[in-house]
Image (cartoon, grey):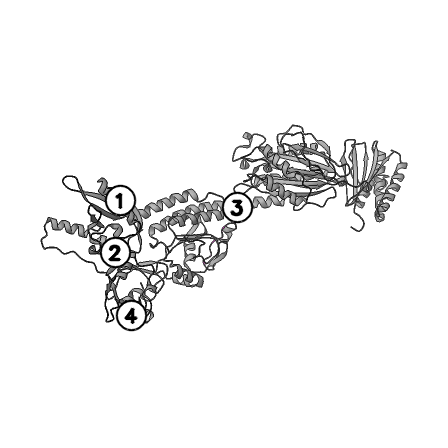
Amino acid sequence: MDSRGGTPGGTVEGRVPEDLAVVVDADGIITVWSAGARQLLGYEAEEVVGRPAAALLAADLPESARRHVAGGGRWATEVALRHRGGGRVVVRLKGTPLADGDGARPWLVTAADQEHMAGPVEPDAEALWDLTLAQLPVPVAVYDTEARLVAANEVMTRVMGRTLAEMRGLTLWEIEPTPPFDEYDRLQRQVLRTGEPLFHENFGQAPGEVRGHAWSMFLSPLKDESGAVRGVSAAVFDTTEQYWARRRLAVLNDASLRIGSTLDVTRTAEELAEVAVTGFADFVTVDLLESVALGEEPEPVPPDRPVTVRRTAQRSVLDGCPESVVPTGERTFYPVDTPPMRALIAGRGTRPGPLDPGMREWVESSPARAETVAKYMIHSVMMVPLRARGVTLGLVHFLRHRTTEPFSEDDLLLAEEIVARAAVSVDNARRYTHERRTALTLQRSLLPERPPDLAAMEVAYRYLPAGAGADVGGDWFDVIPLSGARVALVVGDVVGHGIHASATMGRLRTAVRTLADVDLAPDELLTQLDDLVVRLDREEGPETRGGRPSETVTAGEVGATCLYAVYDPVSRRCTMARAGHPPPAVVTPGGEVRFLNLPTGPPLGLGGLPFESVEVELEEGSLLALYTDGLVEAADRDIEVGLNLLRGALADRAGPLEETCDDVLRTVLPARPADDIVLMLARTSALDAARVRTWHLERDPAAVARARKAASEQVTAWGLGEASFATELIVSELVTNAVRYGDDPVVLRLIRDSALICEVSDGSSTAPHLRRARVFDEGGRGLLLVAQMAERWGSRQTATGKTIWAELGLPGE
């Protein structure tokens, strides 16, 4: 050790100089400081003379030494001192009381000398036996029938911090009236009473030492020729190494059980810190590379520039981690050529010692870190990189300040072992987080961002992905505006989880939108969707089947459930069909809740089975609730329980839909949802009769003019005179086609909604189509003109034929 510098971060066994001498007056003030003291602790005389001696203590004096100081007797014990450089120096000192002219009691503190037993030049057997007991390197003591000390060897007196003369004739409790000596005294009396030997283990600090030891104590009865117990002997063995070895094995076993219990990066880091603090460290920090903390691919550690890390977890034996200089969750960085950076680059654990050239610079580079090291006397440090599959993920710091023993090489091996196990769990959690985030992003990108503004109904919804312990599912929903101011609502759930389920969900949602644009009835739409799922199931290759040949795969592994509903605000009728999906709930304006008894229908993907539509009339202001099974099903409850909870949550809900969504989830949601959850609420509206006009027309060419005139007058009455010309043209062409090519009945309907809608229905199911008219053709230009004048146009099949519709933007919008 350098006599001036010293280095924070270690405990050193001090080699006491021969000329060590310090004089402390009766008030505890240093009055004399020798060159040997300066060599040991690094302080010059002018730095310490006149200061309290207690300021140099890194730990309190043992209790036995404090009693001797108070009583004015000589003492000898281990003392932990504070080096000028911030480290700890453990030495064995002795104190001799002096007397000055005023009767005060100054003390002379010097190195503790080893006392040697002397014997005759030619000792006899008894003398040799006495020498053996006296010089045995194991603490040994003998007690009489009253458990009072009779004899003790020199090692025992050193451990106890008292001379044999001071202890002779006293019981252990009288010698040291502090736990666990009361327990030792009780055990000795038990041996004296029963005559049976005892074995006892304990970890603690002996009176004459400043560091804890593990002691294995053998208490044996001493019997005479008649078998009577005449005393008890105590042989104490220092089993500290075995104790720490057992502790390390226990920590390793604890790590294998506790680390990696979840697929969460932060929780895994916290488990690592908890295991280490519980087992062998006083303060542990886990810093992950910024990319790893975000769940991304780890970036290589650059040797020529600082590395940014995030303090993901930290634990301490002290409440609140007061040793920390970086809050949990905050970012920090490792400068170039510092011990943390060198550990990251090398990829191996390090145990910087007191003389490590970079440790002082690292500590002093941060005033807060230097203050913490000095305040809490952090004396031993290990730095172990988190590495998995050949990639560095972060760095773990292990520190000691309350535990007096410095980290050993075995501790470093233990730390590397548990960190290696934790690193695999962290990497697994990171990979899972990345895949889950990708699936969530994909799924959310395929779902509507906000409810559309509709005249037919007000819509609110909630989508909740499954918890962090499960993969993303394939739940989806959609709100699709249709012609004639109608709205389609769809809720579905793809079988399975993960990115594959999300991708399948996206394909089905796109297909539903396409089929909805064709204006298929709900049962026909589900039939078409069922065919699509069957095709998807056949197209799946071995790579998505766990490597099995496609010809051995049974049908139906790609499956889904779906509920499709179409609401018409003009007639207030809702047509619905479902494919293996939970039934929708309807809440009347009066608060009555009922689940619609729709035909269940098979799940999508079975193929060849029919679906059936049901049409219900809804009162204006009715609430329609669509949801996926994750809302009402749970492993710990029956589905009927979930449905009853949903029924109660929906009753008397006349408030805003957003609040109703939150209330329903709070009431019905399982404690630990295992599946994605979709809840969609729609409050229906009805178009005012004044906003809808209908005319029944004869299949007569003269009806075209009458229809054109009636439409123009109605548009003008609605204050939309600017759209009169376009309306007349569209009505004229559509009615002409119906009269010329359709069948009875012919019906014209105008709807004023967010757009002006013109609809012409007839009894023919023949779909119209655009065609290119030649120069001398008399017809073929009607639908082309409609397409040019309207913002949107199309046709849909009806129960009695077809309807051709066109939409015009409102003037000024």
Q: Are marks 2 and 3 in contact (CB under 8 Å)?
A: no
Q: Is residue 252 left or right of residue 326?
A: left
Among numbered discs 4 and 1, the one appearing first in the sequence:
4
- Mark 1 secondary-structure assignment: helix
Query: Given this view, does label 4 or label 1 mark the residue nearer the observer?
Result: 1
Crowding around mark 2 (Cα neighbors within 10 Å: few <14, some 14 to 19, many 20+) is: many
**Residue flagged by tag 1: what amino acid is it?**
Leu
Among numbered discs 2 and 3, the one appearing first in the sequence:
2
**Residue flagged by tag 3: what amino acid is it?**
Thr
Q: CA distance from mark 2 to mark 1?
A: 22 Å
Query: Given this view, does label 2 or label 3 mark the residue nearer the observer?
Result: 2
- The segment highlighted magenta reads 296-304
Q: Which residue is mark 2?
A: 161
Q: Does the rendering let one see residue 390? A: no
Q: Are marks 2 and 4 in contact (CB under 8 Å)?
A: no
Q: Which residue is mark 3?
A: 433
**Residue flagged by tag 4: what amino acid is it?**
Thr
Q: CA distance from mark 3 to mark 1?
A: 57 Å
- Residue 738 location in percent, x, y? 83, 35
Q: CA distance from mark 2 to mark 4?
A: 26 Å
Crowding around mark 1 (Cα neighbors within 10 Å: few <14, some 14 to 19, many 20+) is: some
Among numbered discs 3 and 1, the one appearing first in the sequence:
1
Q: Quadrant of residue 734?
A: top right
Q: Which residue is mark 4?
A: 31
